[in-house]
Amino acid sequence: MDEKDMELYEKLSRLQWLMQRSHLRNHVKNGPVGDPTRGQGRVLAMLKIQPEISSKDLAYLLGIRQQSLNELLNKLEKKGYVTRMPSETDRRVMLVHLTEQGKQAQDENSGADDAGLFDCLSPEERDQFNAYLDRMIAAFEQKCGDGMDDNAREWMRGACERMGKDQFERLMSMRMGGRSFGNHFGQGGPGFGPFGGFGRPDDPEDE
């Protein structure tokens, strides 16, 4: 790694550190639902995009165990932010719904410190930056593989059909919780989720 590459790497590392610091401030300032990158806040952020979703799909997207998801949903349900009910077409499937109160709670926290992260870039610069990130991610995936197994690929195909392509891609772009760069299928890394490349591992600090 030459001097210029090292400088770029250090800047990306600092940006990631600053983003994590901002997430922590939001968590402290607004409580468990104030941080859209972890715990209850992350659940609400995904439900705002997909107001009705099966608990199984939600667990996949979050990259956490069903038991851990149930603990988060129990807390959100007690606050009146979500409801759970069996699917009318398949009673074995439990559907999670975002309530109006939950939507309001999510909206109130949309002004988080990092909400305008890319405001310093023009639309053209954002597109260019996005293209650079895509090329970097593709290069890493070519070297390291996409980190997905057959179960993950099968789930992705089914979820895309259930939710619609646009909705699914938006949800997938959130699965890293803002703790990594890039937003397309196949991104992963050591320790990310139970399905190899999805989300991130259960966070013991999630509230």
Image: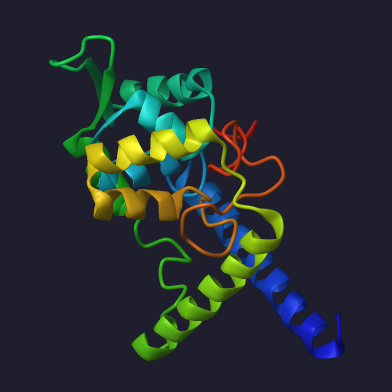
Residue sitting at 44 percent across and 77 percent down?
Answer: 118
Q: Residue 12: where, in percent of width, then height?
A: 68, 74
Q: Is residue 146 left or right of 159 when viewed as pictured?
A: right
In the rendered image, the residue lying farthest to the top is: 91
Q: Residue 54: where, in percent of width, then height?
A: 30, 27
Residue sitting at 35 percent across and 44 percent down?
Answer: 46
Q: Nearer the viewer, residue 168 or 55?
A: 168
Label total for image: 0
Q: Nearer the viewer, residue 136 or 71?
A: 136
Q: Residue 91: where, in percent of width, then height?
A: 22, 9
In the rendered image, the residue lying farthest to the right is: 2
Q: Is residue 121 above or below residue 185?
A: below
Q: Colour scheme of this structure image?
A: rainbow
Quadrant location of residue 196?
Answer: top right
Q: Is residue 115 above or below residue 69?
A: below
Q: Nearer the viewer, residue 173 or 99?
A: 173
Residue sitting at 23 percent across and 37 percent down?
Answer: 162
Q: Nearer the viewer, residue 31 or 17?
A: 17
Q: Residue 190: where, in percent of width, then height?
A: 72, 45
Residue sitting at 34 percent across and 21 percent down?
Answer: 78
* Residue 40 visible in the shown view: no
Q: Is residue 115 above or below residue 93?
A: below
Q: Quadrant of the N terminus?
A: bottom right
Quadrant location of residue 133?
Answer: bottom right
Q: Is residue 132 left or right of 154 when viewed as pictured?
A: right
